[in-house]
């Protein structure tokens, strides 16, 4: 069975600090996808990144970076030089069985990130 | 215009009433999903549909039903609403086999059952 754990329920940091959001997953598949979504205070869910299980390269997009480590089943998300606009709930998610009709995405419970000015 | 739209955006209703939440998409995706979000629980899948003739239960389908009227439309019904169905409901779409797997979400419907 697949499972996603985001142990950090809430994080609060001062603007310009770096912050890392942890994500640990469980799966028995060798082929799977991992995602991060952002939910700002306005409520919509915004897709941030997809990573497949065969690509362990870290990804950087501006102030955002993602560290995927299969050895520890983790897909952590770091925001460098955080800004108030980064305040949101962030969800990590996992999908197995991409090519079968049973593919579904399982979400973690989310981490609420507050950036204080 | 938004690719995935939901109506209504907010709804307050009473226990026992029948409620329908509607979702439309212009992304041309085959797959559509309904989730509910409760504080501290993330998103939980209610129903999903991979094409017009395919409907599948998710992890929390009891008390809900769905209808896939067309490729672009997927409705969620609460036959007899109860207070613990108060939540934020999201519709999502994805492209299906051969497409990137990520899902794209509508703006959400906030439902309150009194």
Image: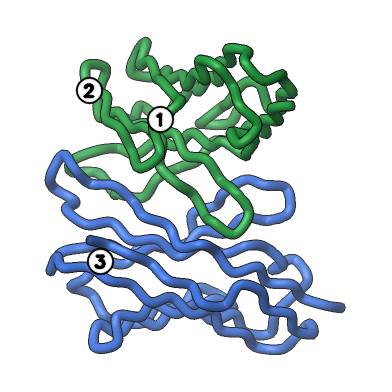
| Residue at screen point 44% across, 24% down | B64
- Tell me: residue B96, above or below residue A30: above
Disc 1 packing (10 Å; few <14; some 14–19; many ≥20) = few
Residue A47's spot in the image, x, y percent?
49, 54
Q: Disc 3 marks which residue? A: A52
Image quadrant in which you'd find residue B93: top left
Quadrant assignment, res B45: top left
Element assignment for label 2: strand
The CA span between labels 2 and 1 is 18 Å
Looking at the figure, which quarter contains the C terminus of chain B? top right
Nearer the observer, disc 2 or disc 1? 1
Q: Residue at x 35, y 12 (%)?
A: B70
Q: CA distance from mark 3 to mark 2?
A: 26 Å
Would you call the spot at circle 2 few (<14 residues within 10 Å), some (14-19), or many (20 or more)? few
Image coordinates of residue B30 in percent, x first then y, are 29, 28
Q: Label 1: chain? A: B
Mark identifier at residue B40: none
Q: Which residue is mark 1?
A: B62
Is residue A42 found left or right of A107 in the rendered image? right
Mark 3 belongs to chain: A
Q: Chain of mark 2?
A: B
| Residue at x-position 49% and y-position 33% | B91
Label 3: few (<14), some (14–19) or many (≥20) C-alpha neighbours in 10 Å: some
Query: Which mark sits nearer the N-terminus, 2 or 1?
Result: 2
Q: Which quarter of the figure has residue A112?
A: bottom right
Visual hue assigned to chain A: blue
Give the image location of residue B82, x and y in percent. Answer: 61, 26
Q: Judge depth for marks 3 and 2 and give the one in front.
A: 2
Q: Which chain is green?
A: B
What residue sits right under mark 2 in the picture?
A: B54
């Amino acid at each position: 069975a697949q499972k996603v754990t985001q142990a950090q329920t809430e994080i609060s940091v001062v603007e310009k600090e770096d912050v890392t959001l942890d994500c640990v997953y469980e799966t028995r598949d060798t082929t799977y996808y991992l995602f991060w979504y952002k939910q700002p205070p306005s409520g919509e869910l915004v897709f941030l990144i997809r990573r497949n299980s065969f690509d362990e390269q870290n990804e950087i997009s501006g102030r955002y970076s993602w560290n995927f480590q299969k050895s520890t089943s983790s897909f952590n998300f770091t925001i460098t030089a955080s800004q108030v606009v980064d305040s949101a709930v962030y969800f990590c998610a996992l999908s197995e069985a991409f090519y079968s009709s049973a593919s579904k995405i399982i979400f973690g419970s989310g981490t609420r990130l507050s950036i204080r000015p | 215009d938004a690719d995935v739209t939901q109506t209504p955006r907010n709804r307050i209703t009473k226990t026992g009433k029948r409620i329908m939440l509607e979702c439309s998409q212009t992304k041309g995706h085959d797959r559509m999903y309904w989730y509910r979000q409760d504080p501290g629980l993330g998103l939980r899948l209610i129903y999903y549909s991979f094409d017009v003739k395919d409907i599948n239960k998710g992890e929390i389908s009891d008390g809900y039903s769905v209808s896939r009227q067309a490729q672009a439309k997927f409705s969620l019904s609460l036959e007899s609403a109860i207070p613990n169905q108060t939540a934020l409901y999201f519709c999502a779409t994805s492209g299906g086999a051969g497409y990137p797997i990520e899902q794209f979400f509508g703006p959400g419907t906030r439902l309150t059952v009194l």
